[in-house]
Image (cartoon, rainbow, N blue to C red):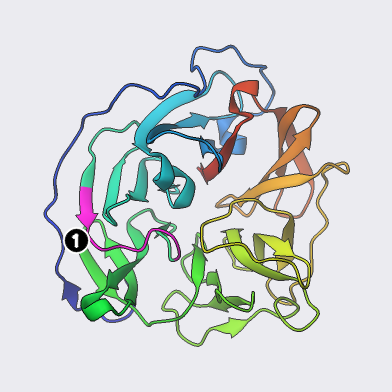
Amino acid sequence: PPGDRTPRPTAPVTPDPTTAPSTPGTPDATESTQTSQATSAELGTLFYGPAPGTIGDRTRLFSWTGSGAPQRGAEIPRLAAMLNATVSPDGRRVAWVDDAAALYVADVDGSGKRKLLDSVDGQCWGPVWSGDSRTLGVAVVDRTGGDYKDTKGVYDLDQERFYEVRQVSGCHPVWSARGDTVVYSDGSAGKVMITGGTLRTPSAIKGIGGPGQPFSLDLSSISPDGTKIALLLRPPGAEGGDVARELRVNAVVRTSDGQPIDLPLDGRGMTQAFFQPDGGLVVRVEDGDGYALVLVSPDGEKVTEVAEPAALRDMQIVSVAG
């Protein structure tokens, strides 16, 4: 990991392979779904969690590869599933921060659960996976004496250590698959900042967050080369919402100038978008009473489309792996 490699104290590793019964109201993994020509090799594996507004203390993640039935995955706290849960790019592990500010990781089926760190920010800064699925970008919080101070860094899963990196002010970072670009919201004016993997010399992306310009406090995904980001753009003067993660997407823009990129969506409304490691883009669009997934190639051409199962209609995509 980049930056200062002075280790910080870590919590004991506590294996907990158990899982609990599924939550009522979640998709039935045995439900038949419409098949399509899309394969997991094209779409990757999509991981779904509860949409904002759902109730209950715990929930399950579900995965789907574009055909067959959604598969039940790890059970995690409902708030964590909405606020910060994220699946590693290789599709093997899920990380989240619970209500007690503890960082956990588990296999996507819920087995091998273990606690990594205490006092971790679960609303503003990550956790966010590196492209090689070996480290997590997180912020450790210190409230000593009533003051709030967060220390941004990376947790190395191989070494089981947290390393501090350069400190910046902002929220909702996204980390490119190549590892050399991080983009985040400044958390106040709605500017979108871009920097390298060490968080040094961040600069604002043109055209976003200035006077009379659209702004964004919520970023969803970044292309592997760092040239495009999927985000929720709000019009000038609009309400900014709260600090909580928002995975809705209404634009994909260039990081060079902040200008939107046209996508082959046949006029349908985009609701979510996630970049793939090869630069392709999986876009969730409104389609009749439900949703469809459109795969867009790195050069902006439509590759394939598949209707999403009705069982996933009231959920949101939290990650796309593979």
- Residue 33 coordinates in the image, percent (x, y): 62, 16
Q: Is residue 314 visible?
A: yes
> Residue at 68% of width from left, 72% of height from top?
255
121, above or below 185, in the image: above
- Residue 11 coordinates in the image, percent (x, y): 14, 58
Quadrant for the N terminus, please. Answer: bottom left
Q: State the residue in front, 68 or 288.
A: 288
Check if residue 120 falls in the magenta segment: yes
> Residue at 42% of width from left, 61% of height from top?
126
Q: Is residue 48 visible?
A: no
> Residue at 61% of width from left, 31% of height from top?
314
Q: Is residue 197 left or right of residue 190?
A: left
Q: Which residue is mark 1?
A: 159
- Using the rendered view, name the quadrant where residue 267 is placed: top right
Question: Which type of secondary structure does the marked residue at label 1 adopt?
Answer: loop
Q: Is residue 133 left or right of residue 183?
A: left
- Using the rendered view, name the quadrant where residue 226 is placed: bottom right
> Residue at 14% of width from left, 50% of height from top?
13
- Residue 234 coordinates in the image, percent (x, y): 73, 64
Q: State the residue in front, 159 or 20.
A: 20
Q: Which residues are magenta?
A: 115-124
